[in-house]
Image (tube, rainbow, N blue to C red):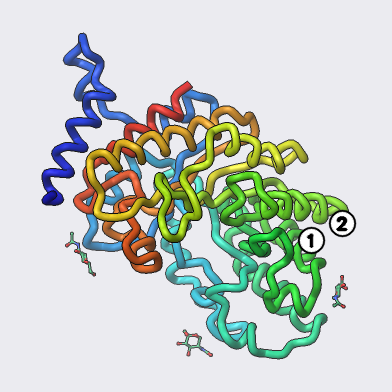
């Protein structure tokens, strides 16, 4: 099927789920994801963002639908401290300034991670004491620069293996598990943001979810503050070669959120995309719309789920096809920035 007919079919499907049958007035009423979620008493709906000067549709969509942004790459270590104590903030500053100017929340992302970490850190053979001082210098300069600007920080990203044990990163092998409370303690020293642990594949209440709960307890056991756990939610609406199965049920998603929320922290979905085997068909897009609805409903059902962020606006720039060949179409807007059925499914799910 030609792509434009998919779009036409999905728009037809979408409007049938949304238009009030007896009112022409309601039909053209602009919808807004974040306003709907705020009416449900929650804080924000966000998107990851890479600024592209030629994509003029994106600022308009952000204004309409999102009240939070996450810089997709601009704040990662390789972008902000490419060589030791040489900080490059120009790119990151643009996002923080944009958020301030447009009164958006900003989930700052991220401080301590094993990936997109320059070789000078991973291969530096630093001893424990030196590596901690490198971590402190990074957090001091990056988090300190935006002390009052970031709404949230992903302090530590992806510390866990799939079985819930710690990943053998330079942080873990050099410092041990103490690197987690140390990073959070430093983040609390230099930032006013809510401090999050963030990971993927923890949405189905499995061994890795238990690992995330263990991390929350560990950090608290050091007398250090942790405010939230980010569930990345890189999910799939059907079984794909890389997904290991279909979407978890709403019940399972809720149980996974409760696994950490019940320890006294906030939870959030931080990087939502729901991929499928491509090409998309109207039937698959309808299944995906239900999947987005289920994810939104799971957040709304858990009191401490404060917000949700999707990992990009348009399928045009999603990371999925480049990394998982033959999979994609994972976001709320198609490659031409038209709302997909997924948009309306998500909207329906986040309304009380
Ligand atoms: C913007 O530029 C990128 C390449 O840098 C291109 O892929 C994209 O199609 C352009 N968008 C528009 C609207 O021209
Ligand atoms: C700092 O990093 C930038 C970006 O990689 C590089 O162009 C510059 O030469 C570096 N400066 C120093 C003093 O290392
Ligand atoms: C590294 O130093 C920190 C801070 O003193 C400590 O908590 C941690 O256990 C040390 N790690 C190792 C492997 O000695």
Quick one: SS at disc 1?
helix
Q: Is residue 237 above or below residue 290?
A: below
Q: Is residue 294 above or below residue 207?
A: above
User: Left of 224 or right of it: where is 98?
Assistant: left
Q: Callout 1: few (<14), some (14-19), or many (20+) C-alpha neighbours within 10 Å?
A: many
Compared across the picture, whether 29 is left or right of 225 comes to left
Asked if marks 1 and 2 touch (Cβ < 8 Å), the reply is yes
Closer to the chain start, of discs 1 and 2, is 1
Residue 77 x %, y %: 56, 73
Q: Which residue is mark 2?
A: 222
Seen at 73% across and 63% down, the residue is: 165
The label shown at residue 90 is none
Q: Which residue is mark 1?
A: 181
Identify the image quadrant of residue 98.
bottom left
Is residue 68 in view?
no
Q: Is residue 52 visible?
A: yes
Label 2 CA crowd tier, 10 Å (few <14, some 14–19, many 20+): few
Name which residue lies at 65% across and 52% down.
196
Residue 309, relative to residue 21: is it above or below?
A: below
Q: In which quadrant of the rendered view does residue 204 lie?
A: top right
Q: Pick whichever, 338 or 242, lies toward us.
A: 242
Which residue is at a point 64% across and 83% down the rendered structure image? Answer: 121
Q: Is residue 140 left or right of residue 287?
A: right
Count of marks overlaid on the render? 2
| Ligand 3 image-quadrant field | bottom right
Q: State the SS at label 2.
A: loop
Q: Position of residue 304 (x, y in %)?
A: 64, 34
Residue at screen point 40% across, 41% down: 66
């Amino acid at each position: 099927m030609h792509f434009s007919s998919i779009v036409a079919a999905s728009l037809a499907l979408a409007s049938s789920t949304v238009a009030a049958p007896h009112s022409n007035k309601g039909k053209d009423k602009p919808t807004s994801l974040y306003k709907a979620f705020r009416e449900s008493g929650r804080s924000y709906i966000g998107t990851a963002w890479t600024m592209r000067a030629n994509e003029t549709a994106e600022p308009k969509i952000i204004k309409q639908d999102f009240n939070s942004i996450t810089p997709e790459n601009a704040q990662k270590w390789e972008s902000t401290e490419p060589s030791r104590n040489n900080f490059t903030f120009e790119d990151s500053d643009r996002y923080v300034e944009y958020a301030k100017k447009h009164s958006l929340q900003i989930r700052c992302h991220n401080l301590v991670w094993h990936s997109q970490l320059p070789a000078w850190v991973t291969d530096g053979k630093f001893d424990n004491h030196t590596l901690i001082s490198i971590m402190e210098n990074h957090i001091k300069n990056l988090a300190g620069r935006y002390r009052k600007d970031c709404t949230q920080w992903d302090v530590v990203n992806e510390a866990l293996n799939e079985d819930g044990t710690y990943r053998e990163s330079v942080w873990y092998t050099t410092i041990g598990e103490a690197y987690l409370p140390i990073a959070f303690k430093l983040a609390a020293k230099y930032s006013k943001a809510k401090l999050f642990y963030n990971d993927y594949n923890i949405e189905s209440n499995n061994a890795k979810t238990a690992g995330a709960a263990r991390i929350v307890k560990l950090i608290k056991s050091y007398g250090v503050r942790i405010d939230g756990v980010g569930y990345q939610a890189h999910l799939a609406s059907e079984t794909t070669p890389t997904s290991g199965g279909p979407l978890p049920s709403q019940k399972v998603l809720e149980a996974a959120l409760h696994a950490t929320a019940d320890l006294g922290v906030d939870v959030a979905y931080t990087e939502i995309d729901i991929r499928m085997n491509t090409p998309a068909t109207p039937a698959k897009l309808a299944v995906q719309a239900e999947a987005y609805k289920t994810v939104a409903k799971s957040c709304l059902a858990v009191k401490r789920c404060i917000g949700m962020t999707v990992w990009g606006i348009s399928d045009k720039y999603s990371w999925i096809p480049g990394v998982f060949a033959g999979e994609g179409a994972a976001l709320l807007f198609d490659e031409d920035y038209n709302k997909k059925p997924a948009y309306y499914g998500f909207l329906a799910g986040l309304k009380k």
